[in-house]
Amino acid sequence: MITFVPEPRLLESPRGRDWPVLPSTPAAVAPEPPSGADVVIVGAGPAGLAVASALWHHGVRDIVVVDRDGRPCGRFFDRVDLLGQRVLRSPYEHHPGVEGYRDCELLDFARLHWSVLTPVERREIRMAQAGHRSVVPVDVFEAYCRHLAASHHVTERTWRGSVREVLPTSDAVTVRADRFSVTARHAVLCLGEERRSAPDTWWGGGYPPRGVSYWDEPVPESGKRLAVVGAGLTAAHLISTGLAQGREVHWVVREAGERYQCADVNSSFFRPEGRARFDGVSWSDRLELMGRFRRASIMFEFRPLLEAAEAEGRLVVHRGKAITKVTPGVSLQLEDGSRVSVDYAVLALGTTPSIGDGLMPDDAVLERGGWPQLDERTFAYVGAPRVFAVGAAAGMALGPAARNIDGHRVATARVAAAVAENLRRDAPLRTAAKDVARV
């Protein structure tokens, strides 16, 4: 059998180029959003941007987007740049745009800016046009997200705020942030995922000891020996950066070997027949499918780079050895009794979906095994029908692809249609209520 392995140079693309931008209104200048709206979107990452753009096409313009950073996709790209990541795992056909409305899609956008692209990037576009897997530069994706935010008037409807509570009632939803509150007919939670913490047994819980940090924090460039703990794409980026800095990198992988594949979930789940595997399946069976297919893996492009570094002794891989203790200094004790001593250690232990617990009452989330209970047709919370989920939280309704950009697009199409229909249905009631108030 012949295995095709893409070239490592596909991992490199320029960052920070000047892209032509659409004339647009500025970011929200009012310190606080209006107290009422048709829809509140919590989170302005790729999922929140997709939802806001889709609602615009449905004619729903009275929206408020609340985001902790206050910039559409700002936190997403800050994390990407912190890792030194230059290309996305998602191919061109996976994008946060809107289907069915002749919107400019990611591949269209890249072709329109052909003169800005490198020869390698142009070749990848030709690959995408031919129906093959292609690599999308982070720079192209960020410029496209800015285009979406401008063309769908998302930036001007986005406010910075840390959401403290989401309180649903039978006819409205109130979102309370640190500085303001907004009551809307519907809310869409695009909360994304948060880093997974290390087990308490490693150092007794709490913040990591000296010389240890998580993947979403800056890594000091001092020190010759670096340890990276984790088996996913984030770990691969951290390893690549450490090797480029001339460090000796130790890679601790709990499983017996690394997993290299194009996507972080089985590609079948991006297609209707794959998503149909969740239809009519019991909760326990879905949990089994999520555990089997939502596992850490690395883009194929990293394989030659990491294998060469290991052969040369610049990368030491500790396979099949779980960590039992971490002590300052830094020493990682493994389950076989051996120790890995380094100057600094970075933990890339994966992520957990933010499902709305801690924001909404328990009877709204109806959490089961770390997942909310959602209507499988609309992705509304069963316990709070005016609140919807897009992103990783929809995993048990949509399947493993829910956490990916293409999964966002599938969920967005259903959620936006459901919200728009509900608003049309409620419009006569709202008009009648206003007439009564005038009398």
Image (spheres, rainbow, N blue to C red):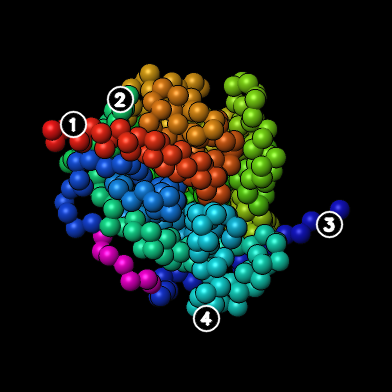
Q: In this view, does 16 lie above or below 365?
A: below
Highlighted magenta segment, given as a residue range: 21-27
Residue marked by disc 3 = 2
Question: Label 3's element?
Answer: loop
Residue 83 picture quarter: bottom left
Q: Residue at x 28, y 57 (%)?
A: 156
Q: How many labels does the image show?
A: 4
Residue marked by disc 2 = 169
- In magenta stretch: residue 395: no
Mark 2 or mark 3, whichever is nearer to me: 2
The residue under label 2 is which amino acid type? Thr
Mark 2 or mark 1, whichever is nearer to me: 1
Taken as a whole, is the magenta stretch helix, strand or loop? loop
The residue under label 4 is which amino acid type? Ser
Residue 301 picture quarter: bottom right
Mark 3 or mark 4, whichever is nearer to me: 4
Which of the marked residues, 1 or 4, is nearer the chain's N terminus? 4
Q: Distance between the residues labelled 2 and 3?
A: 58 Å
Question: Label 4's element?
Answer: helix
Disc number placed over residue 436 in the picture, else none: 1
Within-10-Å neighbours for mark 2: few <14, some 14–19, many 20+: few
Residue marked by disc 4 = 115
Q: Which residue is drawn at 58% across and 29% down?
A: 335
Q: How far apart are marks 3 and 1 (CA)?
A: 74 Å
- In magenta stretch: residue 23: yes
- Extreme top residue here? 363
